[in-house]
Amino acid sequence: MRYASRDSIRFETPASLRRCGAARGFVFEGELRGNGVLLWLRGDTSLRGGRYPVLPRGDTLTPRGAVVAVRFMIGDMAHGLTLDSGWVTVATGGGEAEQRGASAAVAGAGLEATAGRRVGVAAEFTNTTPASAGDSARCETRL
């Protein structure tokens, strides 16, 4: 997984792909030393390629979309945001993506509350390999 912000903060880390429990979508995630990106694709029972709109935090009505959270370190200070606009593009290698893995590209923006500014985000999940069949994430929306 690769992440870069407009301020040129960059990091690379291994990424994983898991199915959400109760067929609520799929989770891509990558984290290293406090920097990370979490992507929840909502609404599909099987992982499909295509474009997903970024959903704002707390959206419980839109059936299909992506919720994206980003955390990054600047020195000893942690920063984070949830994207409120943008798109996620998913590519699968054909066949059952849950068995073969997938890639995702994130492009969006959100409010980083610590600094009180909007931050643009570009992140890529490449060559993610799915977790074992018994390993699923608990995915739900709560306000």
Image (cartoon, helix red, strand yellow):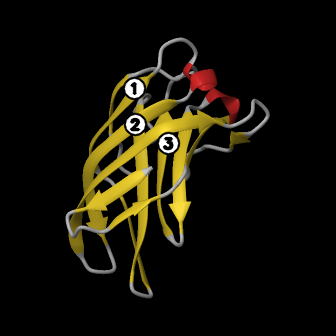
Q: How far apart are the alpha carbons under marks 1 and 2?
A: 6 Å
Give x and y (percent) for residue 97: 55, 21
Amino acid type of disc 2? Answer: Ala
Give x and y (percent) for residue 112: 30, 70
Give above or below for 64 relative to 14.
above
Q: Which residue is mark 2?
A: 104
The first of marks 1 and 3 along the sequence is 3
Amino acid type of disc 1? Answer: Ala
Q: Are marks 1 and 3 in contact (CB under 8 Å)?
A: no
Q: Is residue 31 among what the camera can see?
A: yes
Viewer-nearest residue: 72 or 62: 72
Q: Are marks 3 and 2 in contact (CB under 8 Å)?
A: no
Amino acid type of disc 3? Answer: Trp
Task: Point out the frontmost of discs 1 and 3.
Answer: 1
Q: Which residue is mark 1?
A: 91
Q: Residue furthest bottom?
A: 76
